[in-house]
C-alpha cells in the first residue's frame, strides 16, 4: 500500500492533491528531492551567523517550489518557505527520526485537531529520509511575523554551560502568559506529548506567534516526536507544577503521571471542570486511532514496534493507572 507523503492517505503516489495545495501552493512536487543533505550542510557550515535557526540539530532552508522541484537556499538572505531536517546524527535508530516527527505531527493534527506546522516526509536524492515543514512565521504576503520562544517569553536563565536551566521553569509557568483559549490548547498538547512519549518539549519547543491582529498567541505546534525511540529520556521535559513534582524526588524515584495531574494543571489554569472532562473524553479510547496511523507511517519495523509499545504503555499509565 502507498500512502501520501503528507497526510498518509491511502492509495496515493507521492502527494495527494489537498497536500499539494496546502504544502506547495498547488505545484506538483515529487517526494524525492534532487539534492543531498551534504549539498546543503557544506554550505551552511560556511555561514557561522545569520543562516541558522535555533535548535540542536543543523537544519536547511528551502525557498519557493519551482516547477516540480524543491531547491535548497544556498545563499544567505534569500527568503525561505520551508525548513528541512535530516535524520539525527546520533542516538538510537537515527534513520527513523524524520518519519517519527512526521507521523507524530500528523497524529496531533488529524486525530486531535491540534494546530500544527504543515509538514511532510521526503527523501534526499540518495534515498536518506528528510522531514520538511512549511514555515508558519511568514504570512500570505511573505512578511515575517514576530515569533518568540518560551525561553525568551519566560525569561529563563542560562546556566554556566550556556544551557537553559529547564528545571527553573515549569509548564504551570506558561499559564502566566497564555490566553484562556491557549491554556486549553496547551493542556491538550501536554497530554498528547505524554501519550506519544515526547521527552523533549522544552522551553524552545513552544513559541508565541504574532497574529493578524498583532497580538501574540501560541504558535502552531512543531518538533513533536516520540523521543523514546531514540533515547531513554524523562517522561516529560519540564515539571508540570511549580512544586517540581518530578525533579524534587530523591534520586532513583520516578514520578508516575496520571490524567489527574493534567486535570490539576487545568484547575490551576482556571479551566472549567466541564471543559476538562471534555478534554479527557477526547483522548480516552483513541489508542487505536494512533496505532492505525503509526502503522501507515514511514517508520522502520523496529521503530514502529517501539512506537506502538510507547503508546500502549502511556495510555495505560494515564487512564488506567
Ligand atoms: N514550521 C515552522 N515554522 C517556523 N518556525 C519553525 C518551524 N518549525 C520549527 N521552527 C523553529 O525552528 C526551531 C528549531 O526547530 P525544531 O525545534 O524542529 O528543531 P530541533 O533542532 O529538532 O530542535 P531541538 O533542539 O528542540 O531538538 C524551533 O525552535 C522554532 O523556533
Ligand atoms: Mg526544537
Ligand atoms: Zn495528502
Image (cartoon, rainbow, N blue to C red):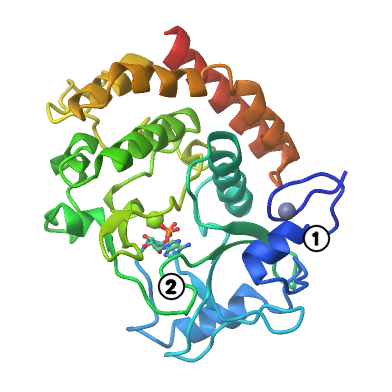
Depth-wise, is mark 1 or mark 2 nearer the camera?
2
Residue 263: percent from the left, percent from the top?
30, 20
Q: Is residue 239 above or below residue 309?
A: below
Residue at horizontal 37%, vertical 55%? 219
Q: Tell which quarter ligand 2 is in.
A: bottom left
Q: Is residue 76 left or right of residue 176?
A: right
Left/right placement of residue 139 relative to residue 288 reads left
Q: What is the quadrant of the N terminus in the image?
A: top right
Q: Secondary structure at mark 1?
A: loop
Q: Which mark is residue 14?
A: 1
Specify whether residue 254 is in view: no
**Residues packed near mark 1 inside 10 Å, few (<14), some (14 to 19) or many (20 plus):** many
Q: Which residue is mark 2?
A: 138
Q: Quadrant of residue 54?
A: bottom left
Estimate how packed mark 2 is, as few (under 14), some (14 to 19) or many (20 or more) residues with alpha carbons within 10 Å: some
- Residue 3 visible from this viewpoint: yes
Between disc 1 and disc 2, whose residue precedes? 1
Amino acid at each position: 500500500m502507498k500512502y501520501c507523503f503528507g497526510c498518509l492517505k491511502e492509495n496515493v503516489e507521492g502527494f495527494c492533491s489537498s497536500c499539494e495545495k496546502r504544502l506547495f501552493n498547488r505545484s506538483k512536487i515529487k517526494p524525492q528531492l534532487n539534492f543531498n543533505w551534504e549539498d546543503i550542510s557544506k554550505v551552511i557550515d560556511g555561514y557561522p551567523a545569520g543562516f541558522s535557526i535555533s535548535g540542536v540539530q543543523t537544519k536547511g532552508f528551502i525557498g519557493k517550489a519551482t516547477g516540480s522541484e524543491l531547491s535548497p537556499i544556498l545563499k544567505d538572505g534569500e527568503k525561505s518557505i520551508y525548513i528541512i531536517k535530516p535524520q539525527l546524527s546520533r542516538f538510537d535508530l537515527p534513520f527513523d527520526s524524520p518519519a517519527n516527527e512526521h507521523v507524530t505531527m500528523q497524529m496531533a493534527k488529524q486525530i486531535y485537531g491540534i494546530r500544527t506546522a504543515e509538514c511532510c516526509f521526503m527523501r534526499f536524492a540518495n534515498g536518506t529520509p528528510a522531514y520538511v515543514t512549511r514555515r508558519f512565521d511568514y504570512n500570505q504576503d511573505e512578511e515575517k511575523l514576530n515569533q518568540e520562544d518560551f525561553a525568551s517569553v519566560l525569561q529563563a536563565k542560562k546556566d554556566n554551560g550556556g544551557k537553559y536551566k529547564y528545571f527553573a521553569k515549569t509548564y504551570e509557568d506558561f499559564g502566566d502568559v497564555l490566553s484562556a483559549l491557549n491554556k486549553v490548547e496547551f493542556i491538550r498538547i501536554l497530554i498528547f506529548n505524554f501519550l506519544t512519549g515526547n521527552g523533549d518539549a522544552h522551553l524552545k519547543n513552544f513559541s508565541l506567534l504574532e497574529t493578524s491582529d498583532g497580538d501574540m498567541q501560541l504558535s502552531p505546534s512543531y518538533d513533536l516526536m516520540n523521543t523514546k525511540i531514540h533515547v531513554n529520556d524523562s517522561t516529560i521535559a519540564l515539571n508540570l507544577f511549580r512544586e517540581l513534582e518530578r525533579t524534587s524526588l530523591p534520586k532513583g524515584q520516578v514520578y508516575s503521571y496520571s490524567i489527574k495531574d493534567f486535570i490539576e494543571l487545568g484547575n490551576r489554569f482556571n479551566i472549567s471542570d466541564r471543559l476538562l472532562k471534555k478534554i479527557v473524553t477526547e483522548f480516552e479510547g483513541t489508542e487505536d486511532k494512533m496505532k492505525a496511523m503509526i502503522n501507515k507511517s514511514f517508520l522502520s519495523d523496529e521503530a514502529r514496534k517501539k512506537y506502538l509499545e510507547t503508546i500502549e504503555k502511556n495510555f495505560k499509565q494515564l487512564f488506567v493507572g
